[in-house]
Amino acid sequence: MSDKSKLQQAVKESLEDYFKHLDGQTPHAIYDMVLGCVEKPMLEYILHKVGGNQSKAAEILGLNRNTLRKKMAQYNLN
């Protein structure tokens, strides 16, 4: 199983668990919830890996450095 497949499987399992524990509540804003749960730790991890170098982090993430800075501000990662 590839690393990409493992990550996809982990997301699917997490979503299954989330829906299983809703206790009758209607799910909402799933897209934003999942992105928020994945995006922040990913940014933190990559920034740590490159010693805080935003140019390197942006390159690894495939983002423009300004986009990275906006996302860092969004998650208070400054």
Image (tube, rainbow, N blue to C red):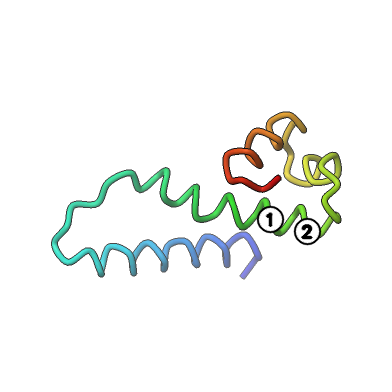
Q: Is residue 58 left or right of residue 18?
A: right
x, y percent for residue 37: 50, 55
Q: Is residue 36 left or right of residue 23?
A: right
The one nearer the camera, 47 or 5, is 47
Q: Secondary structure at mark 1?
A: helix
Q: Are marks 1 and 2 in contact (CB under 8 Å)?
A: yes
x, y percent for residue 74: 57, 39
Q: Amino acid at mark 1?
A: Glu
The circle on residue 44 is 1
The circle on residue 48 is 2
**From the viewer's perspective, is residue 5 above or below residue 61?**
below
x, y percent for residue 32: 42, 43
Q: Secondary structure at mark 2?
A: helix
Which image quarter is the N terminus in? bottom right
Q: Which residue is pictured at 41% across the width and 49% down the height? A: 33
Label 1, label 2: how many angstroms apart (C-alpha)? Answer: 6 Å
The circle on residue 28 is none
Q: Is residue 59 left or right of residue 34?
A: right
